Image (spheres, helix red, strand yellow):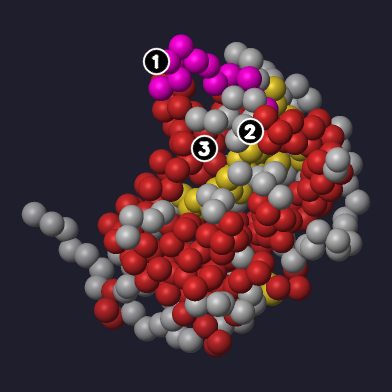
C-alpha cells in the first residue's frame, strides 16, 4: 500500500525578483582578468598532462562542484572548451541551477538561514523553468545538461555568454549534470518530473562513461565535489575498463587531480587508514589512490577555487601556446 505523499499543489512560489541574491555576475573571472596569486608545484605538471592529452586525442574531463561556478570560474571553463582543451565538463544539480540563474537574471544564491524559517527556500517561480527544459529534453532523448543548455541558448538568456551549459550546447562539448533526486531546490517545485530528471541524468551518465572510455593518456580533475565527482567517475571507469579488458586494451595510464580545501597527507598516493577521517573523503581514496594505482599518477591541490582554478587555467594556456 503506498505511503501518504506530500501534496506539492499546496506550495506557494514567489517571483525570483523578490529574492535577495547573494551573488551576481560581477564574480566572473575572465581569461584576461585579474588573479588571486597562487602557486603550486602540481600546476605545471597538470598543464603539461592536459595539453599532451589533447594533442594525442585523449579525454580531458573536469568534474566540478557548484562552488567552482559560484567562485566565478565559468568563463575560464568556457574558454578551455572553446580551445578544445577541455573535452567534458560534469556538474552536480546545484551547479546547473547556479549556471541557469546567472544566465537568466545575472544573479544566484540565496541564504538558507534567511528563507528556510518561513519555508520559502528554493521556491521561486522562474528557477523552476529548468524543470521544463529537462522534461522536454528527456522526451527528445537529450541529456540533462544539453537540454538546459539548449533552452539558455535558444531563448537567448541575457547572460548566456558566461553559461557553461549554453557553451556546451553551442560548441558540441558534453556538459553533463548528475543529480540526486531530493537534493536540489527545483525538486521542491510542483512541475518537477522525477522520471524525466532521472532519464536525462542517466543519459548524461552514459555520455560521461563514454568520455571516460577515452581516458588512456588523458586527465580527470575532480574540483570541489566530494561525492558526485568521485562516485560517478568510479562507476564510469569500471564500465569503460570492463569493455576495454574484453578487447585486450587497458585504461590505466592517465592523470588525476583533486582540487579542494581539506588538508591531506603529503603523499596522496597512499590510502589513509580507516581510523582517520581522511579515509572517508572519497576524492582521496577513489581519485588519488585506487583508480591510478596500476599505472596512473595523481596530484592534490589545496586552496580556494577562486585562486586555484584560474592559476591552472593560466598554466594550461601558457603550455598550449605554439
- How busy is the neighbourhood of tag 3: few (under 14 within 10 Å), some, or many (20 plus)? many
CA gap, disc 3 and disc 2: 12 Å
CA gap, disc 1 and disc 3: 18 Å
Would residue 158 be counted in the magenta stretch? no
- Disc 1 to disc 3: CB gap under 8 Å: no
**Of callouts 3 and 2, the N-terminal one:** 2
- SS of the residue under disc 1: helix
- How busy is the neighbourhood of tag 1: few (under 14 within 10 Å), some, or many (20 plus)? few
- SS of the residue under disc 3: helix
> Which span is picked out in magenta?
243-255
**Of callouts 1 and 3, the N-terminal one:** 3
Q: Which residue is mark 3?
A: 211
Q: Which residue is mark 2?
A: 57
Specify whether residue 225 is in view.
Answer: no
- How busy is the neighbourhood of tag 2: few (under 14 within 10 Å), some, or many (20 plus)? some
Residue at x 58% of width, y 29% of height: 215
> What x and y, as percent, mark residue 30?
79, 63
Specify whether residue 3 is in view.
Answer: yes
Amino acid at each position: 500500500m503506498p505511503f501518504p505523499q506530500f501534496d506539492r499543489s499546496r506550495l506557494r512560489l514567489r517571483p525570483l525578483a523578490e529574492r535577495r541574491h547573494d551573488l551576481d555576475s560581477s564574480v566572473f573571472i575572465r581569461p584576461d582578468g585579474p588573479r588571486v596569486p597562487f602557486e603550486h608545484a602540481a600546476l605545471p605538471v597538470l598543464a603539461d598532462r592536459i595539453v599532451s592529452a589533447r594533442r594525442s586525442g585523449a579525454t580531458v574531463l573536469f568534474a566540478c562542484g557548484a562552488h567552482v561556478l559560484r567562485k566565478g570560474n565559468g568563463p575560464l571553463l568556457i574558454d578551455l572548451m572553446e580551445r578544445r582543451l577541455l573535452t567534458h565538463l560534469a556538474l552536480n544539480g546545484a551547479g546547473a541551477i547556479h549556471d541557469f540563474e546567472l544566465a537568466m537574471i545575472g544573479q544566484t544564491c540565496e541564504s538558507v538561514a534567511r528563507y528556510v524559517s518561513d519555508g520559502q527556500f528554493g521556491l521561486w517561480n522562474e528557477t523552476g523553468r529548468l524543470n521544463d527544459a529537462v522534461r522536454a529534453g528527456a522526451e527528445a532523448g537529450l541529456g540533462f545538461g544539453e537540454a538546459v543548455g539548449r533552452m539558455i541558448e535558444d531563448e537567448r538568456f541575457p547572460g548566456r555568454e558566461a553559461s557553461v551549459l549554453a557553451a556546451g550546447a553551442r560548441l558540441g562539448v558534453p556538459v553533463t549534470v548528475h543529480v540526486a533526486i531530493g537534493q536540489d531546490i527545483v525538486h521542491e517545485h510542483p512541475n518537477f518530473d522525477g522520471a524525466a530528471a532521472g532519464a536525462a541524468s542517466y543519459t548524461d551518465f552514459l555520455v560521461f562513461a563514454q568520455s571516460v572510455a577515452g581516458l588512456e593518456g588523458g586527465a580527470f580533475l575532480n574540483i570541489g565535489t566530494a561525492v558526485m565527482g568521485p562516485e560517478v567517475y568510479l562507476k564510469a571507469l569500471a564500465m569503460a575498463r570492463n569493455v576495454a579488458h574484453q578487447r585486450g586494451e587497458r585504461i590505466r595510464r592517465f592523470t588525476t587531480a583533486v582540487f579542494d580545501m581539506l588538508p591531506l597527507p603529503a603523499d596522496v598516493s597512499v590510502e589513509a587508514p580507516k581510523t582517520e577521517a581522511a579515509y572517508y573523503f572519497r576524492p582521496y581514496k577513489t581519485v588519488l589512490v585506487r583508480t591510478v594505482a596500476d599505472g596512473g599518477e595523481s596530484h592534490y591541490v589545496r586552496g580556494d577555487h577562486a585562486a586555484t582554478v584560474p592559476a591552472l587555467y593560466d598554466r594550461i594556456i601558457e603550455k598550449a601556446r605554439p
